[in-house]
Image (spheres, rainbow, N blue to C red):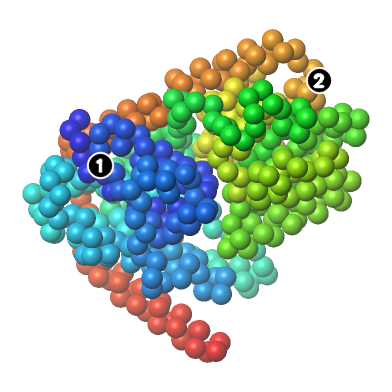
Amino acid sequence: MPPAKITIIHPDLGIGGAERLIIDVALALQSRGHPVTIYTSHRDKSHCFEEARDGTLDVQVRGNTIFPAHVGGRLFVLMAILRQLHLTWELLVGEGATSGDNGEGEEEVFIVDQMPACVPFLKVFGGKKNSRKKQRILFYCHFPDQLLARRDEGGSVLQVLKGLYRVPFDWFEGWAVSASDKVVANSRFTRGVVSGVFGREKVGELSVVYPCVDTKAGDGGEGVVKDGEQLWGGKKILLSVNRFERKKDLALAIRAYHGLGAEKRKGTRLVVAGGYDNRVQENVQYHRELDELATGLGLQTATSKTVISALSIPDSIDVLFLLSVPTAFRDTLLLQAKLLLYTPINEHFGIVPVEAMRAGVPVLASNTGGPLETIVEGETGWLRDAKVDADWTAVMDKVLYGMKQEELDRMSVAAKERVEKEFSLTAMGEKLEQEIEEMLGQEQRPFHGFQQVLALLALVGVVLALVAAFLVKLL
């Protein structure tokens, strides 16, 4: 297809599966000749993927000067929506993103993910500056936000208040998604959930565009250790890579590892690595909880924030926590790990198992959600009940002591072949182009939302007034 101008809008360009996906979307389309710009409300160059800071991709930070990320540790959803609307205002009015003066063709595609707040505004106001430019909006749905909201925390009164607080946001999410010209999901599992939550009349026919890994990038890990050198004197590494969030159930990996027993843990190490942000209270609290769990089980722990400190930990350490591990070191860990442990239940897709298979590492994951679509039982890994620690311990034992190297090598080859065929950057780019070309070849999906947008602006004004009144009362 002819090059189309691609504008991607993503809330917070940190380190996580959603951020890795949007970076790969940008790389896949850019490699196919499309000019791509990513707009985000937050990017910390010390806490983001390399491509988002080294000039590989054009990343612009907007919508971060009026509204904070939260108010006193609360109102995250409201603030996120307002920040995205601020970003959209700056994009449409300040940047002139839709003016068509750049000579980059007559087709422009907005790709929005995670939060659809800006979609109705782009639909209603995006084409006003240049009506001859064909514009379409694709929403990439990771998972409905209303299903991610925690409504069961605190007492009964607080739960009721949280439920009432979420009502307008849950409605708004479905309404905003309906303004998209096309909605795609990251897995068949997510597609089923999205259709059930929003209804087919709002999202239309959903396609699946799997996240990917770059199979042409080489093995990675350059410069971390010398060629042929083994980490920590050749210890057998069991690796968990995920954000430090309770829903990721990293505690399962610790409990199952402890289940091996002291004798079989000799010469091994559990490495719990992943996204960690000091701004996020849950990250800080959950890391502390995991450390307390491990030490309470009699395991010796250490925490490292740098590669140098991680490489120099004592031999006696059983569990190593790596906070926001650099990409090169993560790749080295994947190359040298015996097994990847992927603990979340009902994960929407889960890019980490695919990254491990790309490195030829077998994966042990929960038998729910996205891993059912990425892992082939007994060929590229194992799927087990995340509620049964002993089943996970048994697979660890099997990989460490019960399999011949020939069997592991066979699984490694099968894993790499599966990733190349189903989850490569090339495969994702082809599927994205197919969806975009189909979307551009069709009429815009109808959305009679101008009056609704005005009503929504009025609603936002009322909410802001209430928030301001509440804050004034507190002060």
Residue at point 48%, 57% (across, down) = 44
Does 338 sit left or right of 27 as displayed?
right
Image vertical order of residue 52 relative to residue 64, above or below? above
Image vertical order of residue 380 relative to residue 52, above or below? above
Find disc 1 in the rendering and name its residue: 35
Does 102 sit left or right of 191 as displayed?
left
Alpha carbons under labels 1 and 2: distance apart = 50 Å
Q: Which of marks 1 and 2 is nearer the N terminus?
A: 1
Q: Is mark 1 on a helix, strand or loop?
A: loop
- For the residue pair 186 and 46, the one nearer the viewer reads as 46
Q: Can residue 175 be seen in this view?
A: no
Across and down, in percent, residue 97 comes to 21, 55
Amino acid on which disc 2 is placed:
Tyr
Q: Can residue 283 be seen in this view?
A: yes
Find disc 2 in the rendering and name its residue: 401
The answer to whether the residues at label 1 and label 2 have Cβ atoms under 8 Å apart is: no
Residue at point 30%, 37% (across, down) = 30
Q: Quadrant of the C terminus?
A: bottom right
